Image (spheres, rainbow, N blue to C red):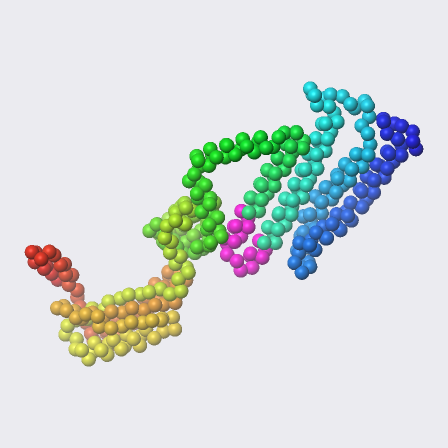
Amino acid sequence: MHQQFWGNSVQAYLEVFVTITVAVLIKRFISKYFAGLFYSLFSSQGKSLYRKSFLELIINPLETFLLFFIILIAFDKLSLPPSLHFTVFRDVDFKTVLESVTNGILIIVLIRLFVRFITFVALVLEEKASNGSSDSTNQLIIFFKDFFRVFLILIGGLLLLHFSFHYRVTNLVTGLSLVGAAVALATKESLENLIASFIIFFDKPFSTGDTVKVQGFNGVVEKIGLRSTRIRTDQKSYITVPNKQMVDTILDNISLRTQRRVDANLAIGLTVKAEELAALTEDIKALLQNDVIENTVVYLSSTGLTANVITIQYFTSISQTWDDFYTFQQQINLGLIKLLEKRNIQPAASLPSVVVMQKEQAVSQNQ
């Protein structure tokens, strides 16, 4: 057992062989045990709703990591044979290359394990968000899932440079900082739009599917991107608005209105008697007694040379779609016409427009 081969005893080779064999045989059970233990720590109140999905994503990379880690520890008990002590390139020997390769594989397997974990967290959040949350929440989850995956890959690349290639990462980070500052100055507007997208995601002034009014355009938000927001206008055109403008300018989220206000002026001829105007006003008030109408105002606002004007103002809770709102407004207008026909009242043909000029000028009237 103590006989030497390639710089190591037979006993050392047997110990390494037994260790690796046992690791191959029980790696599945060890991986399931650690995955279940980690899930119990991660899951609140021991819920097992997502346990199957978690194990499917985590077990394979965890199994690979544990097996490779045990193999690495086992081979560390062996000494490198003298015949393998040679220079590969310049001052780099074979032992250094072997250590760099093993460190690189270990880092890649570990990063893969963390990426799978991020994928599982995103999967759980997406499933929860689909049960009643808005589309912007799902889009935010997808964005951060990709963001953290890229972040982990970058961290893995830096670890590879440091442990496998023995490169001083601090020098690289300093260089990247200078380059990043230059890029930030060159792409200032794009970065502002990117920051504005985070504000939209977190502050949620609007969401996908909302009807908004911004920059003089009315439309439905179809997509919120990292740089801009796409809106389908009421004229069916498709416009792109930078996110910075969506945040900095005054935005009216029409979908969040609880009510819509309607104003109307009913011009009645001067031949109509006061009693008839009063009765017509009461009829209009009765017409507006509706379950979806609140805060009605009906009064004789003015009387002049050509017409008596009845001002009508009401708020309706029909605010979800423009079609419903216009249909309801049409019903009210038709009801007003029927009231005029019922009482045989003729509306005035036109109203005068009065323009007040300077004192030295005359007052003109257009009829």
Point out the image quarter for the C terminus. bottom left
Q: Is residue 48 left or right of residue 19?
A: left
Across and down, in percent, residue 42 comes to: 66, 54
Across and down, in percent, residue 159 comes to: 64, 35
- Give the extent of the magenta segment: 126-143
The correct choice, above or below, for 48 with respect to 100 in the image is below
Across and down, in percent, residue 190 comes to: 44, 40
Q: Please report the residue visible at 68 percent of the width from the left and 41 percent of the height from the top.
A: 110
Q: What secondary structure is the magenta-colored segment mainly?
A: helix
Across and down, in percent, residue 248 comes to: 39, 49
Instruction: Name the foreground residue: 164 vs 347.
Output: 164
Q: Please report the residue visible at 52 percent of the width from the left and 50 percent of the height from the top.
A: 140
Q: Please report the residue visible at 58 percent of the width from the left and 57 percent of the height from the top.
A: 128
Rendering quarter of residue 325: bottom left
Q: Is residue 316 left or right of residue 134?
A: left
Q: Please identify the residue farthest to the top as the structure is shown.
A: 90
In the rendered image, residue 163 lying in the magenta stretch gets the answer no
